[in-house]
Image: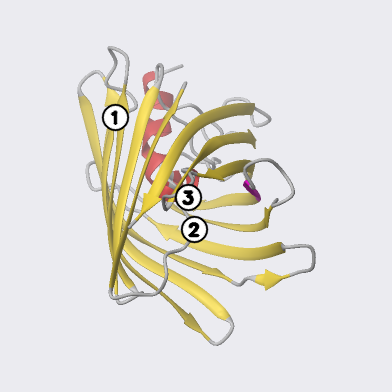
Amino acid sequence: MTRFSTLFAALVIGLGTAHAADAPQPAKAQKKDFACLASLSGSPQLMFDNTGFKHSDGPVAEFYGECTMFDAFYVGGYRAQSLVASARGNEWDAILGRRGSVGPVDYDVRVHYYRFNVGDGVELEQVGGRLALSHDFKLGGRWTLVPMALIDVSPIITTNQNIVGGAVGLAAKRKFVELWGAPTFELNAKVWHYFETPAPNKGTPITSITAKLDYGIRGTSCTAGPTGLVTFGDIIGPDPHRTTFGLKFGGACSF
């Protein structure tokens, strides 16, 4: 890979960093004035659902923490740490946002700051915002369908360039009480597209499919389990038909 490709691979990390969305999640806490969650996971390589690429040179640990006030405003932090002698794959993020509903539509609007290492001692910074819209449809057989759409604008302040992109997707969720441990299964599919990137002709749609299986830990508000990810397409190139696989295992607790 050329140095430019490596750099561009890192530039799009911010748009794809799913933070807690990629980690095994606890059940939603009951509504209260103040609630927090924390998740920790490990994976053979750092991978996000919107780039079709692996962003580390080896295994990484990922941490996400978030606190919500009045069931609306939240502040979160994300950390990815390379577990090998390579700076590529290290990332520090800060997020401030609000979740709520307007009629039948749920929204999540936030601002964020990303700082990540692309290797060779080079660090990049992004600032920006994201708006995500969704709605839960309760179906029979304990299934829930969640269509969603999001748009993300993340200027790269280090290089004075812009990344503008978005996605549409559909999630299917079910708690399998008939299975051992009564795990919650979630299958999530998204199609990403970029309207503006630092590289020409790199808005190629990327399809991602994520599968999660979360087991509740008895007597706690914690869950743990595996997450698998496959992406089709590659915004970095040169092969637009790249298929990439990722796997992680982790847990999360709410309190």
Residue at the (33%, 39%) spot, across then down: 63
Do callouts 1 and 2 mark residues in contact (Cβ within 8 Å)?
A: no
Residue 25: mark in rendering: 3
The outermost residue toward the front is 219
Q: Is residue 5 above or below residue 146?
A: above
Residue 27: mark in rendering: 2
Between circles 1 and 2, the one closer to the viewer is 2
Q: Write the start and end of the magenta stretch as one range.
A: 183-188
Between circles 3 and 1, the one closer to the viewer is 3
Secondary element at image label 3: loop
Residue 244 in which image quadrant: top right
Q: Earlier in the sequence, mark 3 or mark 1?
A: 3
Residue position marked by numbered label 1 in the rendering: 90
Q: Callout 2, which amino acid?
A: Ala
Secondary element at image label 2: loop
Whether residue 233 is visible: no
Q: Callout 1, which amino acid?
A: Asn
Q: Earlier in the sequence, mark 1 or mark 2?
A: 2
